[in-house]
Image (cartoon, rainbow, N blue to C red):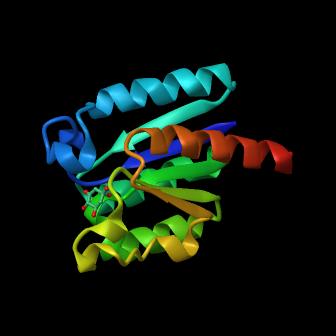
Amino acid sequence: MKILVIHGPNLNLLGKREKTFYGGKLLTEIDSLLQEQAKTSGIELLVFQSNHEGSIIDFLQNASPDASGIIINPGALTHYGLSLRDALSDTNLPIIEVHLSNIYAREEWRHKSVIAPIALGQISGLGWRGYLLALQALSEIMRDKE
Ligand code: DQA
């Protein structure tokens, strides 16, 4: 089983950027934890980060035909990325949306996610642990379907 993990704009700066919201772990550290967990569950993870909506869409179009699910933190694209939403929807894969911070406890413009309506679920505010919980949930849901 292959799962795609996608990190949107500015998430390459994790560990340096607004630590009170996003925590001190580097993106590479989060990715290593995810890879470790995936390995023990026999899952292949394909991880991608980009600051460009079009590059994420290209990645989705190329990689989704061989994948079983998607974990995505779309960064600020969460709030207005309609092309990303269409591309995610076109994959017909189960999607879990992850946010490190609690987007509902921040500025009002962050309260709306254009991705949430096409996602299976959303995890917001649990920091880096949210990614691991998303991976656990998605792999269990996929296994139930098999
Ligand atoms: C974020 C929340 C977004 O509002 C913000 O633009 C991000 C990170 C989060 O993980 O909490 O870049 O997706």
| Left or right of 57 in this view: 36 | right
Q: Quarter of the image containing the N terminus?
A: top right
Closer to us: 53 or 7? 7
Residue shown at 56% from the left, 72% from the top: 118
Residue 3 x/y as whole percent: 59, 41
Q: If the image is split into quadrants, where does the C terminus sit?
A: top right
Among the 4 quarters of the image, the one containing residue 37: top right
Asked if residue 104 is positioned above or below residue 61 in the image, the reply reads below
Residue at figure coordinates x 30%, y 62% from the top left: 53
Please give the count of numbered marks on the rendered protein.
0
Q: Regarding ligand 1, which quadrant of the image does it lie in?
A: bottom left
Q: Is residue 5 above or below residue 24?
A: below
Q: Where is residue 130 shown, x and y percent of the image?
A: 47, 45
**Viewer-side residue, 65 vs 104:** 104
Residue placed at 23% from the left, 33% from the top? 24
* Residue 17 placement, left or right of 119: left
Q: Is residue 17 left or right of residue 109?
A: left
Residue under the point 42% across and 77% down: 114
Where does residue 131 sit, x and y in percent of width and height?
A: 47, 42
In the displayed structure, would residue 61 be above or below residue 11? below
